[in-house]
Amino acid sequence: MPCTVMAAVARPDRPEFTLERLVLDDPRPDEVLVRYEAAGLCHTDLEAAVGHVPTPLPAVLGHEGAGVVEAVGSAVTGLRPGDRVLAGLDSCGSCPNCLRGLPMYCEHHIPLNFGARRADGSTGLADTDGTPVGDHFFGQSSFATHGLAHPRSLIRVDDDIRPEVLAPFGCGVITGAGAVLNSLRVRPGSTVAVFGPGGVGFSALMAAVVAGAARIIVVGREADRLALARELGATDTLDTGDTDPVEGVLELTGGRGVDHSVECTGSLRIMRAATDVLAPLGSAAVLGVTEAEATFEVNAWELLKGRTVTGSVMGHQDPAVLIPRLLALHREGCFPVDRLVRTYPLADINTAVKDVRAGQTVKAVLTM
């Protein structure tokens, strides 16, 4: 029978999330009912809430959910009630990119992850008046006590890591770390610049340390975050309030530039800066989410020096492979994500949003 859940709803006519009681359907044969324990607050959620990405509102957002399976549909295999799971992105499972093991580049990525609907256009959520509310955001909609998820978006995990630490691995952590390890393939002895010390940027930093980078420059604005970056392995930090980021990186590298750069801000100006600091044969990964029509310029002459610029989505590797890899590093003490996390009850989601936007919280995680 349908059940009542609490969820944070993004509505087009309201500037903040509203905490509401909603009615959740039973899982269909191809769905899983998950009781969420924690959900990370990601920049993509904030962009969706204000209409900068193609997600129809009202909807329940959230795409870094950690929880426990409560029920599975009759066609679901590999999961059973009681399994602890981490939710990530959804995919079709049958297009060429999915078959290559790269579901983050699924040919149906936009409708499946941003559409906030099932493939047939229906939703599993409704308000108490019976009006549909979008769900299945990234196959999960985890800003809620319970949600319906697609099995392809769920990864079964051990229960030795606290939910509030586990949740960020669903998107932010793998996005930053995977860009370094998979997209850029940073090698020992190389130089790396990370623009934007947030949850994604710190994950890129920690991955660069694991990869053996000899010099890691973290570029940001908040002094406390730059201090934390040094504690987590940055060899140099640049405060953009005092120094132009391009001039600062070039000065630190004797004018040569860096082998690799990672942009984690969503700022078009910083995307350009991340390419301008590259050494010959250098490579930049652009991770920040912007409005759909946004563009930035790259100097064509400088590209002739063998420079490359690439986008990277959710780690550039199947999350079912990358997440266990990073969780193993966390257990070894090499990936201290817990140092980034600050928890908020689901009811305090708007406080969490304000703190993140003000730079007071690196990684906000909602607890149910």
Image (cartoon, grey):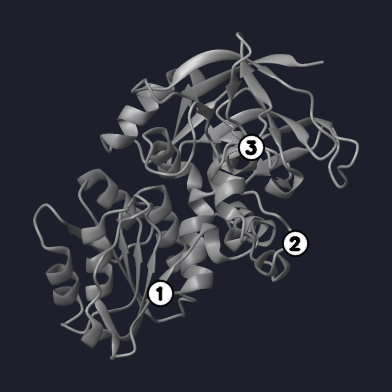
Residue 138 lies, with reference to residue 192, above or below; the image says above
Per the model, the C-alpha gap separating discs 1 and 3 is 35 Å
Label 2 sits on what residue type? Ser
Quadrant of the rendered image containing residue 86: top right
Locate residue 356, reporting x and y percent: 33, 35
Residue placed farthest to the bottom in the image? 305
Q: Earlier in the sequence, mark 3 or mark 2?
A: 2
Residue at image position (69%, 64%) is 98
Residue at image position (76%, 16%) is 2
Residue where numbered disc 2 is placed: 94
Residue placed farthest to the top in the image? 129
Residue where numbered disc 3 is placed: 140
Could you classify mark 2 by the number of other residues whose Cα lies within 10 Å: few (under 14), some (14-19), or many (20 or more)?
few
Residue where numbered disc 1 is placed: 213
Label 1 sits on what residue type? Ala
Residue 163 lies, with reference to residue 78, above or below; the image says above
Locate residue 52, reporting x and y percent: 37, 42
Quadrant of the rendered image containing residue 3: top right
Front: mark 2 or 1: 2
Per the model, the C-alpha gap separating discs 3 and 2 is 20 Å
